[in-house]
Image: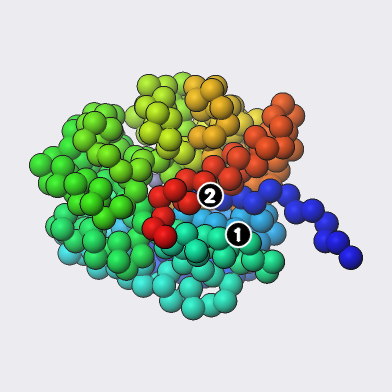
Amino acid sequence: MEESILSPIIVDGHEDIAYNRFVLSRDLFESVAEKRAREGPQPVHGGGSATVGYPELMLGNVRIVFATLYAAPERPGRAEFGKTYSSQQQAHDQAWEQLQYYISIASDPRVTLITRRADLDRVISSPNPGLGLVVLMEGADPIVQPKEVSEWFDAGVRIVGTSWGKTRYAGGTGAPGGLSQLGLELLAEMEGAGMVLDISHMAEQSFFEALDLFHGSMMASHSNCRAFVDTDRQLSDEMIRALVTRDGVIGTVVYNRFLQAGWDKKMGKDAVGLEDVVRHIRHVCDLAGDTLHAAIGSDFDGGFGNESTPREIDTVADLQKLDAVLARDLTNEDVSNILGENWIRFLRRVLPE
Ligand SMILES: [Zn+2]
C-alpha cells in the first residue's frame, strides 16, 4: 500500500534548541504539551509558552533545523536570559557546551548532525522520520580569536553570524557600525575555512562591508523585511537584493513583532496571521524575481513563545499550514522551494563533500 503523500519538507533556518535546553531546561524530545504542563499556565523565563518539541517537528515534517549556539551578553535588564557572559572565555565555554549538547543528542538515532553533503542526503532520503541539525553560531563572541574558526568548523559548526548586538567583530542589532579590525580577520578565517556567514543581526554598515570583503557564502537565517517593520533588525530592500546577488537565502521569522509594525503582546496573537508571514516571504520573492531565495527561519522559542506567534500557530507543526496559504497564488514547486528546498539547495552548495 502506498503511503499518503507527505506535505513538503520544511527546513527551519533558526531555532535556539540548545539555549532552551540550558537556560529553560527544555528537553528537545519532550512534546510541547509536556513542556507546557511542566511549566504551568503562566509562562516563565520571559520567553513564553513552548512551541518546539521533537514530536511536533516530526508532525510538521520539519526535517532540518539550523540549531544555534547562542550565549547572551550581560546587559542591564536582561535577567530573563538566565545565563549571560561577561567575558569572551565565558561566551566560548557556554557555546562550546551547547555544541557538545548537539553532538551528544546526535548519538540518538532520531537526530543527525549535518556537517557534510552526505549527512544532508541521508536525512532527506531516509524513509524514517528524523531530524537533521545544522549548527549555527549566533553572535561570534564565543570565537575568542579569529584563528579559532577552524576549530569550531572541525567540531561541526557550519554557519557563523558575527553579531547579535554589537560584538568585538561587528556592529549589530541596535548598535550601528562597521567591521572592526578583528572582524576583518574573522571573515578572512571564515572564508578560508568554508564557514557560511549569517548576516541576520549584522548592522547595515557591517553587512555592506562584508558584502565587499567576504567571498564565501552568505545567508540570513532569521530576518524579515524592513519594508513592513521599519527597524534595523529587519533587512532593507537593498540588503535583500544584495543577498540575492550572492545567491543567499533569507529565513522569515515567525514572530509577531517582526511580522507586523507596532504589534504588541497586549494586542494578542489573533492580530497577526499567516498572511503576514506570507507578505514578508512574497516581498523577498518580488525583489528576487523568483521563489529561490525566500525561506523560513522561525526563531520559535527564541526569547518569545506561542503567545507572540500568528493565530494559526500553536506549535512548530503548524508551519505546515503555510503550505495552503502560499499555494493560493503560487505553484507547488514555488511552495516547496520556500518551505524547504531553498535551504536544502543552499546547504548542498555550501557543505563540504
Ligand atoms: Zn536572533
| Amino acid type indicated by mark 2 | Ile
> At numbered mark 1, what does the secondary structure look like: helix, strand or loop?
helix
Circles 2 and 1: CB atoms closer than 8 Å: yes
Q: Which residue is mark 2?
A: 344
The reply, left or right, for residue 102 in relation to residue 126 is left
Residue 311, quarter of the rendered image: top right
* Coordinates of residue 185 in the picture (x, y in percent): 14, 47
Q: Is residue 109 visible?
A: yes
* Coordinates of residue 6 in the picture (x, y in percent): 75, 54
Local crowd size for mark 2, using a 10 Å CA cut-off: few (<14), some (14–19), many (≥20): some
Query: Where is 162 relative to 110, above or below?
Result: above
Residue drawn at x 36%, y 65% as measured from the top left: 156
Residue drawn at x 35%, y 60% as measured from the top left: 157
Q: Which residue is mark 1?
A: 124
Residue 256, quarter of the rendered image: top right
The reply, left or right, for residue 301 in relation to residue 110 is left
Query: Where is 309 relative to 37, above or below?
Result: above
* Coordinates of residue 333 in the picture (x, y in percent): 68, 37
Query: Where is 201 relative to 302, above or below?
Result: above
| Amino acid type indicated by mark 1 | Ile
Residue 16, quarter of the rendered image: bottom left
The count of marks equals 2
Q: Nearer the viewer, residue 179 or 36?
A: 179
Q: Sequence order check: which comes first, mark 2 or mark 1?
A: 1
